[in-house]
Image (cartoon, rainbow, N blue to C red):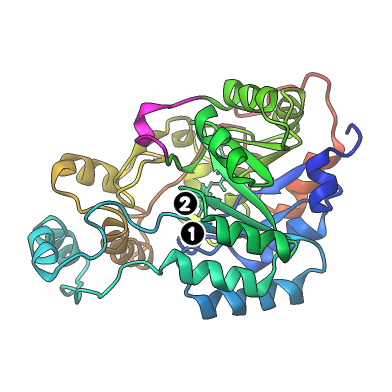
Amino acid sequence: MADASEAQRRIGLRHPIVQGPFGGGLSTVELAATVSNAGGLGSFGAHILDPDGIEDLAAELRAATDEPFALNLWVSDHDPGGDPFSRDAFDAVWPVFAPFFREYGLDKPEPQARYHPRFEDQAEAILETRPRVFSFVFGIPDAVTLKACRERDILTLGAATTLAEAEALDAAGVDLVLATGFEAGGHRPAFLEPADNNLVGTLPLTRQIAARLKRPVIAAGGIADRAGIDAALTLGAGAAQLGTAFLACAESGTSDAHRDVLFSPRARHTVLTRAYTGRLARGIPNRVIAEMEARAADLPPFPVQAWFLGHLKRAAIEAGDEDFASLYAGQGAPLLTHRRAGDLMTELTTASPARAPAPAGA
Ligand SMILES: Cc1cc2nc3c(=O)[nH]c(=O)nc-3n(C[C@H](O)[C@H](O)[C@H](O)COP(=O)(O)O)c2cc1C
C-alpha cells in the first residue's frame, strides 16, 4: 500500500482500514480487538449501552488490545414522537405487533420510561474512558463535547451522507469525516435532511468530500475487498471503513442464520427499509421487512420500533428462524469470501492486485 495517510498517522494505524461499528448488540470486543491488533481500527457500536456499560466495555477492550480503537454512538437518540412515548401511544401501536408476539408465544411487554439511553449521558462516559477515536452518526455533538474531546486527545470521526453534512462536520471542528454512501449496510445516518432525500453513492460522495475538505476522509459503503479499498484511496480517502465484510465474520455478534444469508445468493438483493428500527437502513428482504412495510403508516418512530422488533428478533433467533431477524447487509455482500476477521485482514493488507479479478461466486 502507499505511504501512510494522514488519517492513519493521526489515529496511529498500520493499515488504512476501519472495521465499521455495529449497533444493536452486533459488535463484539473480540472482533474490534482482532482488527486493532492486526493494524486496522477496530470499532464498537455502543449506542444501546448505558454509561456504566460503556465504561465496562472500554475496560474490556483495553484488556484485549493495546492498539487504538473507536467507540461509536448515535447523536440523535430519538425521532419526533419517539421520546417521550406515552402509554396511550404504546397501546395504540400494540395491535401492529400483537399477532407476531402471539406467534412466538410472547406476552405483551410493559411500556418503558425511555426506549434508548440519553446521548448526553453516553457522551460523558466516552469522555471518561478516552478511546483513541469517538465515532458518531446521526448528527454532531455539541461544541462543549467536541472541545472536551480535543482536551482529552480523543479524535472525533463523524459520518456524512452528503457534501453539506461533511461541511457541517468540518465547520464544527470534527477531526475526521466518514463519507458514507448509500450502498452501505446498516443505517443511512443522515442528519440535515430526511435520509431518502439524498441517496448519494460512495464513489461521488468520497470524491466530493475529499476534494472540498482539508480534513482526512474515510470512505464507507459497498467496500468489501482490497480492490475497493484501493479505489477509495484513489478517490482521496485516507482509509476505508468496511462493515458487512466484518459482520459476516465469526467474531461479530450476529447470528449464524444471518451469516449464512450473507454468503448466499440472497445477498445480491438489498433494500432500504424502516422496518428494523424506524430509521432507513439497508438489509436483505425477508418476512419482517414484508410485514412491517405492509404496515408502514402505523409503525412507531425510532427508537420504539427498534424496541418492539428487538423482542421479535430474539424470539425468532431462539426459534431457529430468521423471519424477524434484521438481515443488515451492504451492496458489497456478494463479494464476501472470508469467515474469520484475521483472514479478512490478511487479505485486505497483503494482496495487491492492480486489477482485482472478481471473487468466485460473486
Ligand atoms: C449491522 C450493522 C450495524 C451498524 N451499526 C452502526 C452503528 O451503530 N453506528 C455506525 O456508525 N455505523 C453502523 N453501521 C455502519 C457500518 O459501521 C459501516 O459504516 C457500513 O457497514 C459500511 O458499509 P458496508 O456494510 O457496505 O461495508 C452498521 C452497519 C451494519 C451492517
Marks 2 and 1, how far apart at CA = 5 Å
Of the 4 image quadrants, the one containing the N terminus is top right
For the residue pair 127 and 97, the one nearer the viewer reads as 127
The amino acid type found where label 2 is placed reads: His
Quarter location, residue 208: top right
Side (left or right) of 300 relative to 51: left
For the residue pair 28 and 45, the one nearer the viewer reads as 45
Residue 106 on image: x %, y %: 20, 72
The amino acid type found where label 1 is placed reads: Ser
On whether residue 193 falls in the magenta region, the answer is yes
Residue 218 on image: x %, y %: 68, 38
Side (left or right) of 48 relative to 220: left
For the residue pair 19 and 176, the one nearer the viewer reads as 176
Q: Secondary structure at mark 1?
A: loop
Side (left or right) of 359 relative to 110: right
- Classify 90 as above or below 35: below
Q: Is residue 286 visible?
A: yes
Residue 239 on image: x %, y %: 74, 38
Residue 75 on image: x %, y %: 47, 55
Quarter location, residue 62: bottom right
Q: Secondary structure at mark 2?
A: helix
Q: What residue would you read off at disc 2?
A: 258
The dot on residue 255 is 1
Query: Residues in magenta?
Result: 192-200
Q: Residue at x 33, y 63 (%)?
A: 310
**Tag 2 and tag 1, C-beta contact below 8 Å:** yes
Q: Is residue 221 visible?
A: no
